[in-house]
Amino acid sequence: MARLIAPVVTQVPIQWLYPTGRSQESSHKSWRSRYFDWADVIAGDFHYIRRYLPEQMPGKIVLTNTTTADDVELLRKRGVKMLVTTTPRFDGRSLPTNLLEASFVAVTGKHPLSSGAYRELLAKSGLEPDIQQLQ
């Protein structure tokens, strides 16, 4: 299936696949909302989560990547119980995962790094996920 789809998908504009610019800030009601209702844990890229975020998410746990202070407040207002970001928070914003990866590559001077090397560097760094109780 990938052999058929990949050549086409790699040629379409990134905006078709991933929210960019102002579209990252907007929400859309969608049939996808039923999955938010069904799941106890919502996990994924925050731009996608915000794009399809229902008005109410009482008691849900969100596991995601980079979030800002405004994103945290949005989730709090929607009733999210807990927010877990994969990286620590500095000055109200969780550290972007790609920035952390780039830092590790720069420090080691090696690319690509194995998953074991990333785990080792992460352990040495002392960096941990950010966990916030919102309700």
Image (spheres, rainbow, N blue to C red):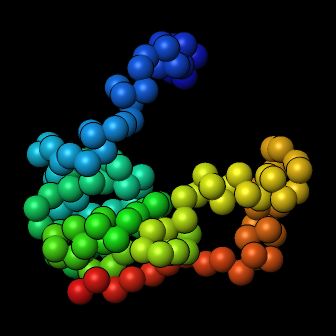
Identified at 30% across, 44% down, the residue is 24
134 sits to left or right of 117? left
126 sits to left or right of 90? right
- Residue 57: image x %, image y %? 17, 69
82 sits to left or right of 3? left
Identified at 71% across, 52% down, the residue is 102
- Which quadrant of the view contains residue 43? bottom left
> Can residue 133 be seen at all in this image of the molecule?
yes
Residue occupying the far right of the picture? 109
Question: How many marks overall?
Answer: 0
> Can residue 35 be seen at all in this image of the molecule?
no
114 sits to left or right of 96? right
Quadrant location, the C terminus: bottom left
- Which quadrant of the view contains residue 39? bottom left
- Residue 63: image x %, image y %? 41, 67
- Residue 97: image x %, image y %? 58, 58
* 12 shown above or below 112: above
Residue occupying the far front of the picture? 91
* 132 shown above or below 33: below
- Residue 13: image x %, image y %? 41, 20
Identified at 36% across, 37% down, the residue is 20
Identified at 39% across, 83% down, the residue is 132
